[in-house]
Amino acid sequence: MQITPPVMVVHGPDIFDLGYVRWLVECICPRETIVSGVMARTAAEESGLTLRFAGQPPSSVLRDLAGPAFLANCGKTCESGRIFGRIIAGRLLPAGLVHLECSDRTIYAWNVADFLLADWLSRATGFPVERCPAMPDIEMAGMREIRGCIPGEPVFVNGLVIGTATASTVVIRGRDGSIEPVSGLDPKPHGFEKLARLGPVDPATAWCKSGVVRRRDSGGSHDIQRGTVRGRVVVIDHCGHGLYHHLDGGVAGVLAIGDDTTSVCGHICAHRGVPVFGIVDGDADGVVVPRFAPGSVIIRVASGNDDLVGLELAENIPGGPVEWSAWVSAQVDLVGDRGTVMYPPGCPR
């Protein structure tokens, strides 16, 4: 049976780090491969494959495509992979969804899916097809469920860690523009404070996830780029997942405020050769394997002061380009005895 080559919409870093995307490209020869969401982009760039980056949720990408297309995912567990597919399928109703799930090597045909495409993918991969229904998520007023959690892992809302999961489903709710925990969460008060500082949050539309940003690390060995010695300084305040919107050839480095933000920014920027100046206070949740480009510096301040010191430095960033090493030296002097300078591995003094 011949079909029009489909578009493959890929989600998450694991599917790259475990080699599934390269294998799927070789055996399926998709018309195009699109990376959806945000957190897969570093792994995708390091894969060396020809890809398009959408920067949108997979449901939005799939909804806008014409012709055959399918979602390729690799959940952290078989259950979470299936839950993720069901959520995406519910958002696409009344259309169906073909979902190739690598965690359990199954092709799910959700609702009125393209069954010809599902069967074709099954023959190409050897994965069996399972037909299953999905309904739209029905949330109680102001409530949001974050499903597929593993107790002990961090829980994010809009890129900020708000606590640690204590159950497979975390429930949060909105109240007067802010978010508060309901069940299944050991809350991190400082995380909720940071979230509130960024403005009103609607739990129905917020970006929510659980688990680390990237569980595996390829080492970033593919086509490592060289950074710009002179250029703009980008400020990322506790929302490392938004960094890609600011990176371009004119960026000399990143001022990252917060422990996990520093780790995420360092991980993303290492592949691009962009150094990071991080302000931390030691409350990291270990959301990603940290690595940094040469020229990176971290300053550890007293507990709870990373926000204050980081925002002070952010206010003094000039509007034009800077010479990175000179700017870093000036910031170290500005912080003075309020913090301790640390040099990440591979970043000489």
Image (spheres, rainbow, N blue to C red):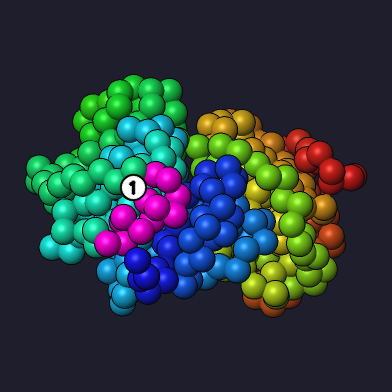
Instruction: Name the amino acid, label 1.
Output: Ile
Residue 100 location (% of width, % of height): 37, 50
Whether residue 54 appears in this view of the structure is no
User: Residue placed at 31% from the left, 77% from the top?
Assistant: 66
Does residue 233 appear to the left or right of 56 in the view shown?
Answer: right
Q: Is residue 333 magenta?
A: no
Q: Is residue 259 left or right of residue 80?
A: right
Question: Principal SS element in the magenta part?
Answer: helix
Residue reaching furthest front?
1
Rendering coords of residue 139 (x, y %) = 13, 45
Magenta region, residue range: 116-127
Is 119 contained in the magenta span? Answer: yes
Measured as percent of width and height from the top left, residue 258 is found at 57, 43
User: Quadrant of the rendered structure where residue 64 is?
Assistant: bottom left
Q: Residue at x 33, y 32 (%)?
A: 79
Q: Does residue 46 appear to the left or right of 285 in the view shown?
A: right
The quadrant the C terminus occupies is top right
Q: Where is residue 222 shown, x and y percent of the image?
A: 74, 57
Residue 329 shows in the view: yes
For residue 309, above or below residue 115 = above
Q: 43 and 9: which one is in front?
A: 9
| Residue at image coords 76%, 62% | 223
Picture layout, residue 277 above or below residue 323: above
Residue on which disc 1 sits: 107
* Image quarter hosting the N terminus: bottom left
Q: Viewer-proximal residue, 129 or 291?
A: 129
Q: Secondary structure at mark 1?
A: strand
Find residue 306 and report its image quarter.
top right
Query: Local crowd at mark 1 within 10 Å, few (<14), some, or many (≥20)?
Result: many
The residue that appears at 15% across and 47% down in the rendered structure is: 133
